[in-house]
Image: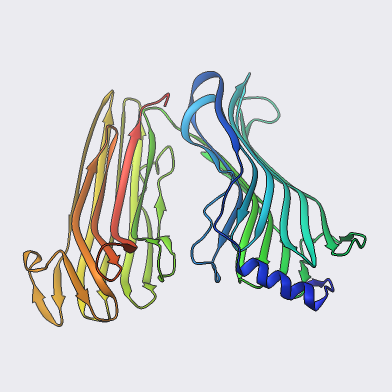
Amino acid sequence: MRSRLVPVATALAVAASTALMMAPTSTAAPAAGGDSSAKLTNTNFAFTATGYGTLVEGGMVPADSGTTGFSTIACTNQAGKTRDNYIAEVNVPGLGTISGVRTDVQTRQRKNKVFSLAKHSVADVSILDTPLGSLSITGVSATSRVTYTKSGPDKGFKTATNTSVLGIKLQPAGGLPAQTLPLPTPDQPIEIPGLATISLGKSIEKKNRQGATAYANALFIHVIPTDTTVKVARSAAKLERGAVSGIFNGNSSPVRADVIGDLIRVGRAVNSIMPCTGTDGELKKKSAASVNLADQVVVDGAYSQQRANQVKGRASGTEESGVAKISLGGDALVIEGLQAKVNVVRKGGKVTKNGFTKFVGITAGGQAQELDQLPETIEIPGVGLVKLEFNLKRKTAWGMKVVALRITLLEAGGDDVDSVVNIGEAKLRIQPLGS
């Protein structure tokens, strides 16, 4: 796939690089958003609908921007819900300024059909704004919809996605006329040398007898000066049948890193997300040979797995994750056989839950250690000051979360947190129908 080159003055590209590299932390203008509902109706379907304006990942930006304009309806069997979000303007590190960010997500039932709908639009994306000129993308939108029709010619699950971009403009400084640039096509991105490559996003539609999913991203922008990737206007909708006793919400991940300092942000590695209606009793597994966090924390043999089922009057599920070995500072500290597991059962209005964590052995400097021999905070060569917490558990009304090991990397002196890494994490809850 070849990119279409758009000539831009060298000085303009250099100015863009400087402006983007010095972009301040994201700050939003006053925003409006809400949660409203039509008449709520319980159904035998599980609805999910989400959308956001931008997501910045990777490159020279220290941490991702999170999401702007995010709104979601997650795992509910109720039709009639509406949530929306609007942001007038926000400055996104590694990208520039976006304005007019609007998200609308809905679950609906009409006559013999139900549907899940997510719509997202961004009025303007300003990638570049310097004394030499500016580049803006206007009218970016993405819509995803999943429908189930009970009878008639459209019986069954249907999916639909749509994305659009109104225009791309280069505004030179000095009062020169604006230049309208060509829009990217599916097989030909637009490249502005030294500044950005703009590609059309992807739409994915999947369906089977039990449900359907639709995703749409309007644009992908690779910002060259910061080597970051920006997803613009994302919508997703999902509909699953089989919600007869409860709604599942959970995940299991052998590694989850929340990074503030120098480690690479990995989010959740080998993450298994529980479907809203369960797995129909099937065991779902994921695995990875290794996960490396800047050579400071190295995990081998990571896995996650889950199983859930429901019949009339009873729903049950399990989430599990673990690692064969985790090494800190080379082999300065090695912990083997970490595992975390949660079990939850809902029967009628009663929920029972239990969870456990375990590990096989610990060695420090090649010597076997007992857990009670380890100080809570230790200095590890090549890593620094580290706080270790084992067997963390938290119960909620509808479920439970467990973490086998939490590693907190501390700044010098031990007062400030640099990064937090959970090893062996599992959580699950089963919500009642109508939640």
* Relative to 330, 29 lies left or right: right
On the question of residue 157 being in view, the answer is no
Is 401 situated left or right of 248 in this image?
left
| The one of 124 and 270 positioned closer to us in this rendering | 124
Q: Residue at left 30%, top 68%? A: 411
The picture places residue 127, in percent across and down from the top left corner, at 71, 60
Q: Is residue 17 above or below residue 430?
A: below
Can residue 359 be seen here?
Answer: yes
Answer above or below: position of 62 versus 26.
below
Q: Is residue 141 left or right of residue 132?
A: left
Above or below 320: residue 381: below
Question: Which residue sits at x=59%, y=46%?
Answer: 28
Q: Position of residue 288 (x, y in %)?
A: 38, 68
> The N terminus appears in which quarter of the rendering?
bottom right
Q: Residue at x 29, y 81 (%)?
A: 382
Number of disc labels: 0
Q: Position of residue 408 (x, y in %)?
A: 28, 63
Image quadrant occupied by the C terminus: top left
Judge by depth and name the residue closer to the eye, 346 or 168. 168
Q: How is the image coloured?
A: rainbow
